[in-house]
Image: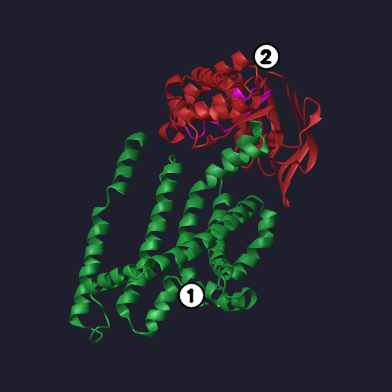
Chain colours: A red, B green
Amino acid sequence: MIRLEGVEVRYGDALAVAATDLEFAQGSFTSLLGPTGCGKSTLLNVVAGFVPPSGGRALMDGAPVTGPGSDRGMVFQHYALLPWFTARGNVEFALKRFGLPRAERRAHALRALDDVGLADAAEKYPAQLSGGMRQRVALARALAAEPRVLLMDEPFGALDAITRRRMQQLLAELWRRTGTTVVLVTHDVDEALVLSQRIVVMAAGPGRVIADHRMDDGTASPEDTRPRIVAQLDTEPR
Amino acid sequence: MARAAAPSVRRGKTASTGPPLVSAGLLLLLWWAAARAGVLGDGLVPTPWQTLKAAHAMWADGTLAADLRASLARAGQGFAYGATAGVALGFLTGHRPRVAALVSPVMSFLRPIPAIALVPLITAWFGIGEQAKHLVIAYAVFLAVWLYVHDGVARIPADYRRAARTLGVPAWRRLTEVLLPAAAPSVVTALRHGAGLAFLALVAAELGGAQSGIAYRLQVDGQFLRTDHMFVGIIELGLLGLAADALIALTGRRLIHWSTS
């Protein structure tokens, strides 16, 4: 479980995120939703251990986060695939720490690529893949490291609408299968509604949480929640 | 799409021996015309044929081979020292901004000081031995290589390193599997530039007291106005630089198969 206790982030004099308390339960799927500059990516980077909080602390299973670790996987908007490795090489890059024999590691990587529908593209380099295929490789790579939490920073933001829809279906399927805790950063209301059990709405100036919608208790349907979120996003001055 | 485009680009690169041959032929023609027209007075511009004969004579009496050997050894060793130090420091400063803040001003101060300006000082300190020549060449190569490598390493996308760390990749593998390949294109550029500078600095080094070498021979021939011999030396320098550059570029292109640059 992830816990943010009074997490605050400053860049120089600017307050990027005001003191924030949040909890992400084991196995849950939460979206951080908000406009540019609301600090949603910054919060994600605090959990990932890339950005140290200026105040408060982030806890992963009770232990303070002091830096990045393999318990918290990350999927980046621009994929962050290593261009000198093939798709399989990128997945094996994540698998090496398990110390498997070569053949087994290879088989494991091919299985991971098969899970994201890329069995045929295993030997291609990132430059030879489309944006959607690259993000599939990145997803396979992140999951191959067997993280407890999967952090996603606008992972489908650079994709076209059709590819984005397919990737959302894939992600939903993978989440159901693996039970990994997912925290997704997005500025797309519908993406958040389709995928998550819970939507944390944020606003800018300074970055802060303005609403916390839970759809998993059966009391609020996505149809009811959508207009409320849209209203919250609109009324907030930017 | 990218796959279809890549081979044609590569073919264009290697099959382009035509234009260089034409430009070499054109240069030769201009040279021949200038020599025949006697623009600078009789015999001051040797014809290509006279230059070729001079080269043959220098080869026959052994000076060409001896000079070539001496100069190549100097340029090679000086380059090796300077490039090694430049790559190593470039990785350190490119990766660690705090070290860079300390080192960069010193490098900016040194960069406008040409190697030739250091020759008298280095001669005073180390004499006219080979070591002093290696030092002059290494200095010039080091500064240029450091700048390119530092810049290249500093530009490695932060996401590469972040991805590696969230995947639990240990530090030594981040160096060998992320930083080194990511910086490889910059290192190749750095080495190409450094190799060119090695030959520039070689001339400076050999003018500071030598008993052999291409630039030393140029100086001696200059005293006797043997322009045909001097042409041989100058062409040698150009060809050596060209060959070194082509060798590094070709090796680089083979190693960095994933990059189009």
A17 or B93, which lies in front? B93
Look at label 1 and name its amino acid. Gln
Residues at marks 2 and 1, common chain?
no
Q: Residue furthest front?
A: B61
Majority secondary structure of the magenta segment? loop
Which quadrant of the structure image shows residue B57?
bottom left
Residue lying at 27% horizontally and 47% vertically, measured from the top left: B15
The residue segment tinted magenta is A144-159
Looking at the rendering, in which quadrant would you find the C terminus of chain A? top right
Report helix, strand or loop for mark 1: loop
Q: Residue A226's spot in the image, x, y percent?
A: 58, 24
Disc 2 sits on a residue from what chain?
Answer: A
Residue B164 appears in the figure: yes
* Residue A71, numbered label: none
Q: Which residue is mark 2?
A: A219
Which quadrant of the structure image shows residue A70?
top right
A174 or A10, which lies in front? A174
Above or below for A149 versus A6: above
Q: Residue furthest bottom?
A: B41
